[in-house]
Each structure stands twice: as structure tokens, then as C-alpha cells.
Image (cartoon, rainbow, N blue to C red):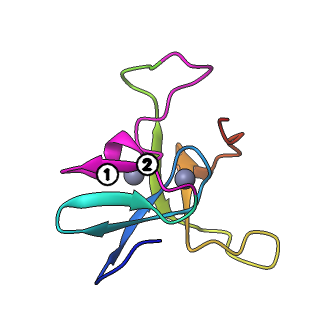
Amino acid sequence: MIEGIVHLEPHVCRHCLSRVVSRDGEFFCSGCGVTCNGKPHGICGCGASINGVRKRAAPFRCGLNPNRGPRSPANFVVLFEGIPAILTPLT
Ligand SMILES: [Zn+2]
Ligand SMILES: [Zn+2]
């Protein structure tokens, strides 16, 4: 449970695709609860790896969902070259 004033970040968790929130410079996943200090990129989809291999130029980034609708209700998603990526949440 996250208490206090939190800010919704324009990033989503790379593990469970839930929205990332921040408080006092610490970033949290609102879904699975992973945390990261200073910047969200340790837990968000920006720089997500492919098959466990981090590619320096991996074109993943978090962004506004361009196809928001009943089948994809999330505000923010992980985009792959601008297209929503179907990421299998890591376990
Ligand atoms: Zn998560
Ligand atoms: Zn991100």
C-alpha cells in the first residue's frame, strides 16, 4: 500500500504493465510494487529487454496509448517503435 501524495508518471511497469507512480523521487509500480530510486527507467518499459537480452537501442518506450478503447483501456502503454507492444509480464 502506497501512502501519501503520489504522482502518476507517464511510464508503465515493465513487469506487469501497471502504471508507475512516484513520491519524493522514488518510483513505484502501482501493480506489483517494484520500486526504483531517482528515475523510473529501472522499472518501466523504457529500455525493456528482449528475451532477457538488453539491447542498447531497444526501441521500447512508455507512451500514450494510441489505440485506447475497450480492448486496450490503459492510458499509457509500452510502445515498440510507436506501436503498442504486447509484452509478456515477467514472473
Ligand atoms: Zn509492476
Ligand atoms: Zn518509461
Q: Let me know if residue 38 is in the magenta part.
A: yes
Three-letter code for the amino acid on which mark 2 is drawn? Cys
Label number found at residue 40: 1
> Which x, y percent locates residue 36?
31, 47
Q: Residue at x 39, y 25 (%)?
A: 57
Q: Is mark 2 within 8 Å of ligand 2?
A: yes
Magenta extent: 32-53
User: Which residue occupies the foreground of this view, 8 or 74?
Assistant: 8
Q: Residue at x 31, y 58 (%)?
A: 27
Q: Where, quadrant-wise, is the C terminus in this rendering?
A: top right
Q: Position of residue 47 (x, y in %)?
A: 41, 35
Which residue is label 2 attached to? 44
Is 30 drawn above or below residue 8 in the view shown?
above
Q: How far separated are the C-alphas under marks 1 and 2?
A: 6 Å
* In front of the other: 78 or 35: 35
Write the residue at 45% across / 20% down.
54
**73 left or right, relative to 17:** right
Locate residue 56: give its quadrant. Answer: top left
Q: Is residue 45 left or right of residue 18?
A: left
Q: Nearer the viewer, residue 47 or 24?
A: 24
Residue 87 on image: x %, y %: 67, 42
- The reply to whether discs 1 and 2 touch (Cβ–Cβ < 8 Å) is yes
The majority secondary structure of the magenta stretch comes to loop
